[in-house]
Image (cartoon, grey):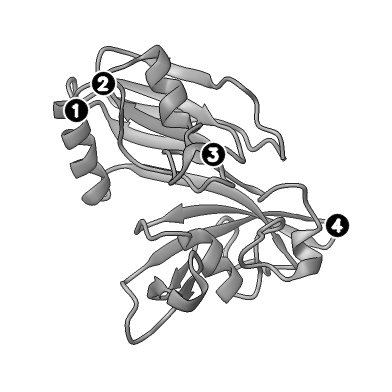
Amino acid sequence: MGVEPGFECLHEDESLLVVLKPAGLLAVPGRGADKADCLSARVQARWPEALVVHRLDEATSGLMLFARSLEIQRALGRAFESRAVDKRYEAIVGGHLGALNADDAWGTIDAPLAADWPNRPRQQVDARRGKPSQTRWRLRGHAQGHTRVELQPLSGRTHQLRVHLAWLGHPILGDRLYAPPALQAAAPRLLLHATALGLDHPRSGVPLRFASAAPF
């Protein structure tokens, strides 16, 4: 799929940047000249001091945070590690995912994840070798035989949301790695968007909340 040449900056201050990553764009450079174009390179062309704090999959769109100094990068890294950053996503998954007992209730997927080495870059649920991984989810609606969900990862494993939902039996539409062919073809892109980031400002301590509506 084509990728917009620019990017949108939603917040800029002396310490950090919050930008919107398009789907289909790498967060950081990959191996080879053909993988040099990425969000971090585009951001650094405008703010040379910008440093990556966390990543999104190439196929995922949404909010990404950048630090403007090594000190802030370390502070934000500690915040992510201690789960002091509230991350929310929205996805459309295949099939009818039923509601929980109470309205607006959260469910939890608790399934350890490990690399599927013969099939890299795929990851897999692995009770023996996997690292602890938890994802909270809640229902946001049904349409056309599919389900819209809000997601809150409590850990930060590679492809965590995608693997957890596929393991639950409801892969994300457009997922070229984890969905069956019919659900891959059901959307022109992976229907996963990082919709919200909540954190305390690393210098002032003021609570910050950033939001971006899913474009699907």
Identify the residue under disc 3: 34
User: Of the residues tagged 3 and 1, which is closer to the observer?
Assistant: 3
Q: Earlier in the sequence, mark 4 or mark 1?
A: 1
- 12 over 21 or under it: above or below: above
Residue 183 screen position, x and y as percent: 76, 64
Identify the residue under disc 2: 68
The count of marks equals 4
Q: Quadrant of residue 212?
A: top right
Give the residue type that dot 2 points to: Arg
Spatial separation of the CA atoms under disc 4 and disc 1:
44 Å
Residue 147 screen position, x and y as percent: 72, 59
Q: Which mark is residue 23?
A: none
Name the side, left or right, on which 99 lies relative to 127: right
Give the residue type that dot 4 points to: Gln
User: Of the residues tagged 4 and 3, which is closer to the observer?
Assistant: 3
Name the side, left or right, on which 191 lies relative to 138: right
Spatial separation of the CA atoms under disc 2 and disc 1:
7 Å
> Could you say which is closer to the camera, residue 65 or residue 209?
65
Identify the residue under disc 4: 144
Q: Please report contact status of discs 4 and 1: CB closer than 8 Å, yes or no.
A: no
Identify the residue under disc 1: 72
User: Of the residues tagged 3 and 2, which is closer to the observer?
Assistant: 3
Q: Please report contact status of discs 2 and 4: CB closer than 8 Å, yes or no.
A: no
Give the residue type that dot 3 points to: Asp
Q: Residue furthest left?
A: 71
Residue 4 screen position, x and y as percent: 65, 25
Spatial separation of the CA atoms under disc 3 and disc 1:
31 Å
Q: Please report contact status of discs 2 and 1: CB closer than 8 Å, yes or no.
A: yes
> Could you say which is closer to the camera, residue 14 or residue 201?
14
Q: Please report contact status of discs 3 and 2: CB closer than 8 Å, yes or no.
A: no
Spatial separation of the CA atoms under disc 3 and disc 2:
27 Å
Q: Earlier in the sequence, mark 4 or mark 3?
A: 3
